[in-house]
Amino acid sequence: MENKTDASAPSVSTQSANLVKNDSAKLDKFVTIDIGSAWTKAFLVAVDSENRVSVEESARLPTSQGDQALVTKLLLTKISAINTPKLFVSHLPEVENLAKKQGGDYVEEAQAAEFLVRFLKKSDANVTVLDAGASNLKESMKAEDIGKYLTFQTNAISLENFFGKKRFKPHILPADTKELEIEEAFLRANLANKLSNQNTNKKITLAATGGIISGTPRLSRIALLILDILGPGIVAQLVFDREFFLPSFGALLARYKQLQIGSPGGWLEELGTFVSLSGKNTVELDWGYSQMQQVELSVGEISLIPAPAGQKIKLTLFPSKKERTEYGIGGGSLGIVLDARPKPLELTFGQAASRKQMGQWLKELEQAEINKEAF
């Protein structure tokens, strides 16, 4: 998904115009169909009188390269879609004609991304959508850039064969933890390039969606993936799409004006604020009380500080003895995550020390997540 913010409002189709007669009109239910490179996803979406967007039902099937209409028909039988307006979103050009034949509306995926960025953007933060979908497989990566993030021993030929098969059948899910690690490692290498030019003096908002991100077995795995790709000095607020729904939400935002001042339901989760300190550092947290909290981190340490979603905090960093930088941040499911590991990470493909280090970091974050859940 592209992240442009200068798009003009799209023209509204006849179907959309009938549904949205004015900005105060009440929306009820829709069906969105997101046709991606690997999966086709259908959602029954409910919008209440306060413009809160919730996912009531969902279903997905591998995308057919031959008969997308058949897959769409099968998905619509799995959800309560009778006489419900349909909205299609895709990067595949042939989907526009499919939408017309199905009596639905169509939004191109790049346009949906533009409206999604507008919705998420705040005055103090730039927005980047981290899409883990199969479209990433079009980009080639060196085996050593992927393999250095693995906790087990393998070789370049095995990795190249794995991704050769994955590009041929992108809908195939990881069969075990090792395959999951390989896909996560590929994402690290791929997404790190997209974040390489971030401004360290301004907070960023990251919206994580799709693929093994939305399908993750634990939040701690996503937390470590994001921390690993953040450059030194980056402060990032992270929101997490649990339902593979962000492209569909962007399409809804593009077509229905009411939703631009609405709110997402539980499918979009605030994970908190991730801070890449890149070494020993001191952090100050102002919670709005009489005393300031000061946190000191040693080189290589990762720390999770509980902070609920909606909690407003002033974070102060000290890049040098004479400098200080302040950010307005918020909490979430993982709270505030402080990372004092030197960046870029000192990892090398084929070295036992690197494999051991990756395994240790993952165990530490998993245990921190378990302790937080128990608390």
Image: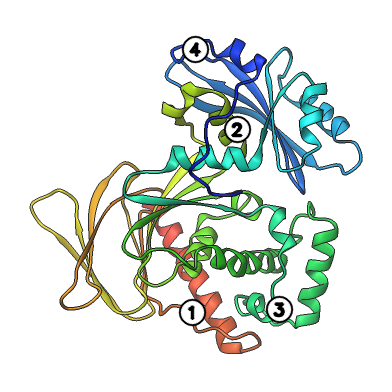
Spatial CA distance of label 2 from label 3 is 36 Å
Sooner in the amino-acid sequence: mark 1 or mark 2? 2
**Is 256 above or below relative to 339?**
above
Say what amino acid the circle numbered 3 marks. Answer: Ala
Report whether 282 appears left or right of 201.
Answer: left
Say what amino acid the circle numbered 1 marks. Answer: Leu
Sooner in the amino-acid sequence: mark 3 or mark 1? 3
Which residue: 38% across, 65% down?
A: 234
Q: Quadrant of residue 354?
A: bottom right
Spatial CA distance of label 2 from label 4 is 18 Å
User: Which disc number belongs to residue 345?
Assistant: 1
Callout 4: SS: loop
Spatial CA distance of label 1 from label 2 is 37 Å
Residue 16 percent across, percent down from the top left: 62, 17
Spatial CA distance of label 3 from label 4 is 52 Å
**Is 293 above or below relative to 232?**
above
Q: Name the residue tied to disc 2.
A: 251
Q: Name the residue tied to disc 4.
A: 26
Sooner in the amino-acid sequence: mark 3 or mark 4? 4
In the displayed image of the protein, which residue is found farthest to the right?
Answer: 66
**Is 154 above or below relative to 161?**
below
User: Which disc number belongs to residue 143?
Assistant: 3
Say what amino acid the circle numbered 2 marks. Answer: Ala
Residue 355 percent across, percent down from the top left: 59, 82
